[in-house]
Amino acid sequence: MKFEKIPTLVVLCILPALIALGFWQLDRAEQKRALLDRQKQSLAAPALQLTTATPEDKEAQRYRQAAANGHYDSEHQILIDNRIVEGKAGYFVLTPFILDGSGKAILVNRGWIPASPDRKVLPDTAIRSEQTQVSGRINFFPSVGIKLAGADQPTAGWPAVVQVADSAVLSARLGYPVFSFMLELDKQAPEGYRREWREAAVMPPEQHVAYALQWFGLAAALALLFVWYSRLK
């Protein structure tokens, strides 16, 4: 059986790529299984009491119920812009909650509030600042599809408007450290706005396995076609 040079080179280039894509999908399936396992563990774990000693591991803490004692910094709030709910533009209201006995805060997402037709007029997000307790669910800050340059820079004045929340940038603006994750305020808690917290949708591991089988199938088909073609020649 004689192999022609050009078809052989083409197959030698494409076949390893197809096999590599199959193994990549299998690896993604394992990553998704690990992610879903962490989510289940966080949802089943007892509520976490936030303190300055709480680890900044947002991957491990995500979706875990948590509580904190302290007070709201009502004078310095952040509005995350361009959050669309039922076709209407609005903001997520992030209010710093300073933990008792420390200068560190957790940014509490108090929910969604609609924007005024005049975008220069910001919503009234007034809140009391006496000692209290908050409870909710730990989550990442809201994400965007494409992060534009300067999207994480808050506007002047308070409340500050920002497109993308970055804990380091907001810490510098507030003048005290904040956690790298936020607390989604319990739906039943007072002084909140529209709250419809959901888990992030992820492709199930089984789908990645199905894609892997497709790539491996294409690799096998290419190999068989190459052998058949070579025998014909």
Image (cartoon, rainbow, N blue to C red):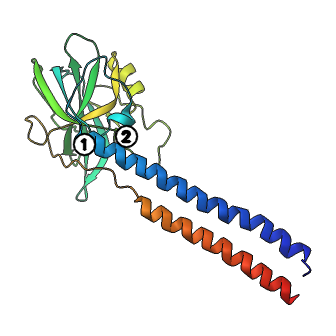
* Residue 137, placed above or below residue 196: above
At a point 15% along the width and 46% down the height, the residue shown is 194
Give residue 76's position: percent from left, percent from top.
24, 23
Give residue 77's position: percent from left, percent from top.
24, 28
Q: Is residue 192 visible?
A: yes
Q: State left or right for residue 148 relative to residue 143.
A: right
- Amino acid at dot 1: Leu
At a point 80% along the width and 70% down the height, the residue shown is 10
Near mark 2 (Cα within 10 A), the count class, few <14, some 14-19 or many ≥20, is many
* Residue 184, placed above or below residue 71: below
At a point 40% along the width and 32% down the height, the residue shown is 166
User: In this figure, which residue is indicated by the disc labeled 2?
Assistant: 163
Farthest residue, direction bottom: 232
User: In this figure, which residue is indicated by the disc labeled 1?
Assistant: 43
At a point 29% along the width and 48% down the height, the residue shown is 83
Give residue 71's position: percent from left, percent from top.
15, 19
Q: Is residue 145 visible?
A: no
Q: Give the secondary structure at mark 2.
A: loop
